[in-house]
Image (tube, helix red, strand yellow):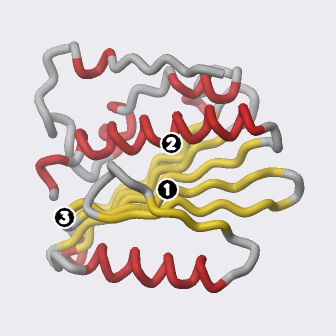
Amino acid sequence: MALLVARPWESEGRELGEFAGFTDATCEAFDLSYLESAFGSEHDPQQDDIFSMNGEDDVFALMCDFHTFGLDQVTVHVNGGRDPDGGMALLQLFRQTAEADPDYRVSDLDGLGDAGYRSAYEHEGAEKIMYHFVQGRLEVSINSDVGPDPGDVEAVDALLTEIAEQALILFASET
């Protein structure tokens, strides 16, 4: 199975970080056409759940919970703050916790951010996959569930990578 990834949002004249910010509008800036490639169902914006927090106690947060018409889901969490080491400390803590659990499979996540890992575990017949990485002051986690077919896992991994790359561009000015 091959997944062709085109990035139309790169060719529309948008500058790096143009849509950056911890606002609901940032969720709308993600190109979600890749959901159909991964899940076989289009994005259903009516089912999305969005939460943003901008600057309370020097903490910034954005949660974009995207859904498809087929009831698939991808959740993106982006956190930032004034502490330049805060994201890395959380990443290390969560990774150690996942590695200590024998049900989790944890591997390095290369090419995304300053450091990161991919974790996966099975729950009720579904593979739960999470990408967790930091870039400067940002801590990013992206997760989704997928069925047991290895081709499906590859497609969701490609989707999570694409969403992660978009997050790095959308938040480039925040790192």
Residue type, numbered disc 2? Leu
Estimate the x, y position of residue 10 in percent, counting from the top left: 24, 21
Q: Is residue 47 visible?
A: no
Q: Which quadrant would the C terminus be assigned to in this image?
A: bottom left
What whole-number distance in Å separates the C-alpha atoms at marks 3 and 1?
A: 16 Å
* Residue 102 coordinates in the image, percent (x, y): 73, 79
Q: In this rendering, is residue 26 above or below 83?
A: above
Q: Position of residue 33 (x, y in %)?
A: 50, 20
Question: What residue is at 59 percent from the left and 30 percent from the top?
Answer: 46
**Circle 2 is placed at which residue position?**
160
In three-dimensional space, the C-alpha distance between marks 3 and 2, rounded to whole angstroms, equals 20 Å
Which residue corresponds to the image point at 19% horizontal and 75% vertical from the top-left? Answer: 58
Q: Would you identify the image quadrant in which residue 89 lies? A: bottom left
* CA–CA distance in space, label 2 to label 1: 7 Å
* Among the two numbered marks 3 and 1 on one chain, the one whose residue lies closer to the N terminus: 1
Q: Nearer the viewer, residue 47 or 107?
A: 107
Mark 1 and mark 2 in contact (Cβ < 8 Å)? yes
Q: Amino acid at mark 3?
A: Gly
> Quick one: 167 or 110, which is closer to the camera?
110
Near mark 2 (Cα within 10 A), the count class, few <14, some 14-19 or many ≥20, is many
Which of pointers 2 and 1 lies earlier in the amino acid sequence? Answer: 1
Residue at the spot of label 3: 136
Tell me the element at label 2.
Answer: helix
Question: Considering the numbered disc 1 on the image, is that residue within a helix, a strand or a loop?
Answer: strand
Task: Identify the image quadrant of the N terminus.
Answer: top right
Q: Which mark is residue 131?
A: 1
Q: Residue at x 63, y 48 (%)?
A: 144
Who's the residue at 31% across and 40% down the image? 26
